[in-house]
């Protein structure tokens, strides 16, 4: 079986996904088409071929005002030329992020794969636009889904969306991402407390640590959150009780990182900025050292990073607009906010008053949620591949 994965390959999820598949099925050949540049932070050595969209170095990228028009068409054309020159008829083409640049002209790309699998990365329906139009994007996405053999996902809203487009309900297959960090967190929690983890990564053990998001993407709203916290006089007067954790080792550009750091310095906040590649044990220790996880991103697809934080016993503050309904169904202990306003600093101050009791309440999450490693979920993905190929 040969598979082409299409998505943002400069990601720990691509690395872990590919390694998990190859560990179970070394006979599966994997090629990758990355829609964005690859900075070499993640190991893709198990792939037979990795091709990178050249948009970032294209002269069109430098033309302000019109580059937003060119990008999706450039990306799709880059993909099409790659498929045509590669002279390969893939068994499966798996789209792992449904941005405008890959959903254009689905019949053209479908000609290079026997079967097409699509996975929503998270938030496409809420965030993606083409030519500034979300309606046009959704129209094209609907056409794309009509040409797909399987939509693999773990969100009810995606299942409902897919089934409304194609009456064949078998098109939707349940599968979710695992995490190689889960086992590391379980191992770490046996012998290492939060305070020890703090000390090992250079944080003071007597401060409350607050993580904002889990990457350097602006969707995590770092700037808005920091401003909201620090313009609240009650919180700002107690700012020295906290250290902020900014995990910006992927998804960020230097310009955005500099803006966030400048803001932190202007408010005279203590912070830990992480911009280099981290090992699995480093990430596990970071989760263990995090007291409060602020997840008020514009959108999310139930990220593995949030699941890791729950296992590590962090106090989660999330937005009601995020697709976390299953947390309520499972009876997990966490907080939700309607919007980013004074309710955020007020809640953090309230949590701080009795944080040891908050940590005790968070322990129930470990028993109410199934924390999956890649070994535990990868068979679902492989079965999807096998079954769709065997389906007439």
Image (cartoon, grey):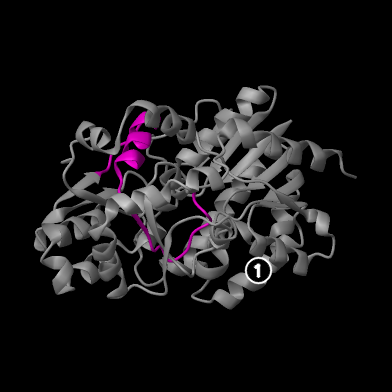
Q: Which residues make up the magenta segment?
A: 274-303
Asked if the stretch drawn in magenta spans residue 297, the answer is yes
**Could you say whether the residue bearing mark 1 is in a helix, strand or loop?**
helix
Split into 4 quadrants, where in the image is the C terminus? top right
Q: Residue at x 48, y 35 (%)?
A: 182
Relative horizontal placement of residue 94, taking residue 348 as reference (left or right): right
Where is mark 1, residue-wise? 140
Crowding at mark 1 (Cα within 10 Å: few <14, some 14-19, many 20+): some
- Up the image or down, 373 lies above or below 174; here it is above
Asked if the stretch drawn in magenta spans residue 309, the answer is no
Q: Quadrant of residue 351?
A: bottom left
Front-most of 228 and 217? 228
Q: Residue at x 27, y 65 (%)?
A: 350
Front-most of 1 and 174? 174
User: Residue 64: horizontal and vertical position, in percent?
Assistant: 34, 68
User: Residue 21: horizontal and vertical position, in percent?
Assistant: 63, 30
Front-most of 1 and 313? 313
Can residue 215 be seen?
no
User: Residue 259: horizontal and vertical position, in percent?
Assistant: 20, 60
Can residue 284 be seen?
yes
Q: Residue at x 15, y 41 (%)?
A: 204
User: Residue 265: horizontal and vertical position, in percent?
Assistant: 11, 57
Relative horizontal placement of residue 313, taking residue 204 as reference (left or right): right
Q: Quadrant of residue 288?
A: top left
Front-most of 135 and 261? 261
């Amino acid at each position: 079986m040969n598979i082409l994965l299409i998505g943002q390959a400069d990601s720990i999820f691509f690395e872990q996904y590919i390694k998990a598949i190859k560990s179970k099925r070394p006979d599966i050949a994997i090629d990758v088409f990355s829609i964005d540049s690859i900075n070499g932070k993640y190991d893709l050595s198990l792939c037979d071929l990795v091709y990178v969209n050249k948009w970032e170095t294209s002269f069109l990228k430098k033309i302000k005002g019109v580059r937003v028009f060119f990008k999706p068409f450039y990306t799709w054309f880059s993909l099409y030329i790659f498929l045509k020159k590669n002279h390969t008829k893939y068994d499966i083409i798996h789209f792992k992020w449904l941005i405008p640049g890959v959903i254009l002209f689905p019949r053209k790309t479908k000609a290079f794969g026997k079967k097409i699998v699509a996975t929503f990365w998270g938030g496409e329906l809420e965030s993606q636009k083409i030519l500034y139009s979300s309606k046009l994007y959704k129209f094209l996405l609907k056409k794309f889904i009509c040409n797909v053999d399987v939509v693999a996902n773990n969100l009810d809203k995606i299942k409902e969306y897919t089934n409304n487009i194609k009456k064949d309900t078998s098109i939707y297959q349940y599968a979710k991402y695992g995490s190689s960090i889960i086992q590391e967190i379980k191992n770490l929690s046996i012998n290492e407390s939060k305070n020890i983890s703090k000390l090992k990564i250079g944080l003071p053990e007597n401060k409350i640590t607050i993580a904002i998001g889990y990457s350097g993407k602006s969707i995590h709203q770092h700037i808005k959150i920091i401003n909201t916290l620090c313009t609240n006089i009650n919180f700002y007067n107690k700012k020295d009780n906290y250290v902020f954790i900014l995990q910006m080792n992927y998804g960020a550009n230097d310009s955005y990182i500099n803006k966030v750091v400048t803001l932190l310095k202007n408010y005279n906040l203590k912070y830990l900025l992480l911009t280099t590649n981290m090992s699995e044990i480093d990430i596990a220790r970071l989760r263990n050292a995090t007291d409060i996880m602020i997840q008020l991103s514009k959108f999310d697809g139930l990220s593995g990073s949030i699941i890791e934080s729950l296992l590590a016993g962090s106090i989660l503050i999330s937005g009601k607009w995020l697709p976390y309904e299953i947390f309520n169904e499972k009876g997990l202990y966490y907080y939700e906010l309607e919007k980013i306003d004074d309710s955020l600093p007020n809640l953090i101050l309230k949590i701080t008053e009795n944080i040891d009791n908050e940590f005790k309440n968070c322990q129930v999450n470990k028993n109410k949620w199934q924390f999956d490693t890649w070994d535990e979920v990868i068979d679902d993905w492989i079965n999807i591949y096998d079954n769709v190929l065997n389906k007439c």
